[in-house]
Amino acid sequence: MAMGTSTRKLNIGMIGFGSFSHFLAKTMMKQGHVVRATSRSDYSHQLGTNFIRDMEEFMGLEHDVILICTSILSVSEVVKSLPFHCLRKPTLFADVLSVKEHPKQILLQEVPEDSDLVCTHPMFGPESGKDGWKDLNFMYERVRVRDEDLCSTFLNIFECEGCKMIEMTCEEHDRLAAQSQFVTHTIGRILSEMQITNTPIDTKGFEKLVQVAESATNNSLDLYSGLFMHNRFAKQQMKNLESALQRVKRLLEARMLRENGDK
Amino acid sequence: MAMGTSTRKLNIGMIGFGSFSHFLAKTMMKQGHVVRATSRSDYSHQLGTNFIRDMEEFMGLEHDVILICTSILSVSEVVKSLPFHCLRKPTLFADVLSVKEHPKQILLQEVPEDSDLVCTHPMFGPESGKDGWKDLNFMYERVRVRDEDLCSTFLNIFECEGCKMIEMTCEEHDRLAAQSQFVTHTIGRILSEMQITNTPIDTKGFEKLVQVAESATNNSLDLYSGLFMHNRFAKQQMKNLESALQRVKRLLEARMLRENGDK
Ligand SMILES: NC(=O)c1ccc[n+]([C@@H]2O[C@H](COP(=O)([O-])OP(=O)(O)OC[C@H]3O[C@@H](n4cnc5c(N)ncnc54)[C@H](OP(=O)(O)O)[C@@H]3O)[C@@H](O)[C@H]2O)c1
Ligand SMILES: NC(=O)c1ccc[n+]([C@@H]2O[C@H](COP(=O)([O-])OP(=O)(O)OC[C@H]3O[C@@H](n4cnc5c(N)ncnc54)[C@H](OP(=O)(O)O)[C@@H]3O)[C@@H](O)[C@H]2O)c1
């Protein structure tokens, strides 16, 4: 794929207009693309938004790309209820969900055969991406692509911001993301359950944990539940975490017995 | 206390010459202080070290400051076996242990009444302090100080490197450090038990956790066991961590039941 800013401007339709969509739309519009959105809630009074309430009207707008940005938990219901018959031309369907096998399967089932399909996961959000997207990871799988030029132009939105473009299967993504992102959210949620906060004597390591806790709880509980329920590798990671905690505890207890025995 | 580099050069005797002592000694010598050390193991063939094997000889060297840098687990045995009768003059005893009530109590018991006592904890190590000590936290309690000038000159070693000097009691330190540093080491050890490593699709949050895991295992298991066994607030934090994990797990399970019930 060619690096650099593409001159072709896309009409992008977003389904689901929550905080992550707002964050993406800002950069897309900055690049000159036209963004129109629809969502469960009404965002039509929001400044600078092309918001379309009616789903049939939205689907008939001749978007080049329709981007699914809805929550993991609702994606099945949302995609299954889309009025695909209103599409006026073959369209590139893309999604940004934080799990990948689940939306891939649903989109393969529901999206009309003549429309293309690319599944993506920008590995960043409004917090980690607030100073730009340079060097942040962007995962994608070209699931069903015939219009190479359109797909490349869409991916170029991320590439020309400096993202590290990583092509891998949705399955491989879910395996790796369960070990990394799901564990990170879980540690963050555990730490905020413990109500950790900065102290006057923080170490650098503890400061990092406070940040991990803050960013975990900045994300919706829907998102976290989605990572657990719709990534088939997540449950095993939860078990791994529990048993690792038990091993560390046993290590300390054995050490304590030995020390006390030495006395 | 006056800021800036003090002109008075100190004779500093270090007891325990492991990796953290080496790290401290480098900066102290850079500042022009004279550092001599003794330890369980023999470091006499190490370049640039004034290493004294014989403990009676070491204690008779007229140090201004004797700095206890031994492991938490061994401090009781080490301090109780020191030949204090060899001291030729009142000396400032200081320690850098990562728990504070425990060495304070031992030093108060063992150090001769005419010698002063300051308990400290530099909240950083060879990794977090590798590019200098600026803005890193340094905790201390002036436990028994008559020679104000000597104690200030000693603390100034850290202050003039830019450390944030935090005066608090050893008890307050242990309460806060159990919530912060002990939890950080524990999370780090759990994550390395899980063998987490970087993936091609790391998020920024996960990168932080990999660093926390690496730095936890760069520290000795003695150090971590010491944090647990000799900080009376640590056990409660271990319980808090376990129950927070259970709460997060139950939250996910309840959410999953509800979602599946909705279908
Ligand atoms: N936040 C991040 O850092 C990040 C990063 C990468 C990928 N993602 C992915 O991006 C997507 C959006 O994430 P988010 O952070 O904005 O929060 P989210 O809680 O995962 O999703 C919120 C979005 O889902 C819609 N939604 C929720 N329940 C719905 C339902 N029952 N029916 C129809 N729509 C529903 C919301 O619509 P309304 O706003 O109209 O209520 C909103 O647009 C998720 O799939 C997430 O995994 C997020
Ligand atoms: N590492 C850090 O980042 C850091 C930061 C702040 C404070 N501290 C504190 O600094 C002290 C030293 O830490 P460390 O990182 O160097 O590792 P450590 O494993 O906590 O301590 C190693 C030191 O303890 C001595 N030692 C261990 N067992 C002994 C025994 N049975 N009898 C006599 N001496 C014994 C070792 O002597 P030999 O080398 O001669 O075997 C070595 O000098 C600890 O109290 C730690 O809590 C460390």
Image: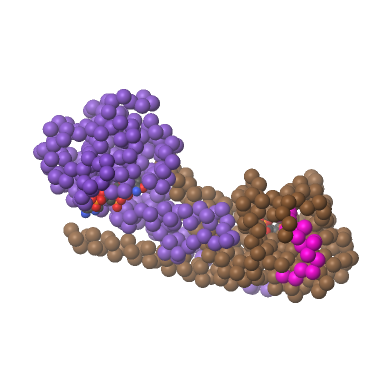
Chain colours: A purple, B brown
B28 relative position to A219: left or right = right
Could you tell me which residue is drawn at 57 percent across and 64 percent down?
Answer: B177
Q: Is residue B173 magenta?
A: no
**Looking at this view, is B234 or A50 the one in front?**
A50
Image location of residue B251, percent across then percent down: 33, 64
For residue A145, which quarter of the picture? top left
Q: In this view of the protein, can residue A242 be seen by the observer?
A: no
Marker count (numbered): 0
Of the 4 image quadrants, the one containing the N terminus of chain A is top left
Could you tell me which residue is drawn at 15 percent across and 39 percent down?
Answer: A59
Q: Main secondary structure of the magenta part?
A: helix
Q: In this view of the protein, can residue B86 be seen by the observer?
A: yes
**Looking at this view, is B8 or B2 the one in front?**
B2
Image location of residue B1, percent across then percent down: 72, 60
Could you tell me which residue is drawn at 45 percent across and 46 percent down?
Answer: B204
B207 relative position to A227: left or right = right
Magenta segment, which residues? Answer: B143-158
Image location of residue B39, percent across then percent down: 77, 58
Q: Is B85 situated above or below B136? A: below
A80 relative position to A94: left or right = left
Q: Is B241 situated above or below A161? A: below
For residue A202, which quarter of the picture? bottom right
Q: Is A40 situated above or below A149? A: below
Image location of residue A249, percent across then percent down: 51, 65
Could you tell me which residue is drawn at 25 percent across and 34 percent down?
Answer: A34
Of the 4 image quadrants, the one containing the C terminus of chain A is bottom right
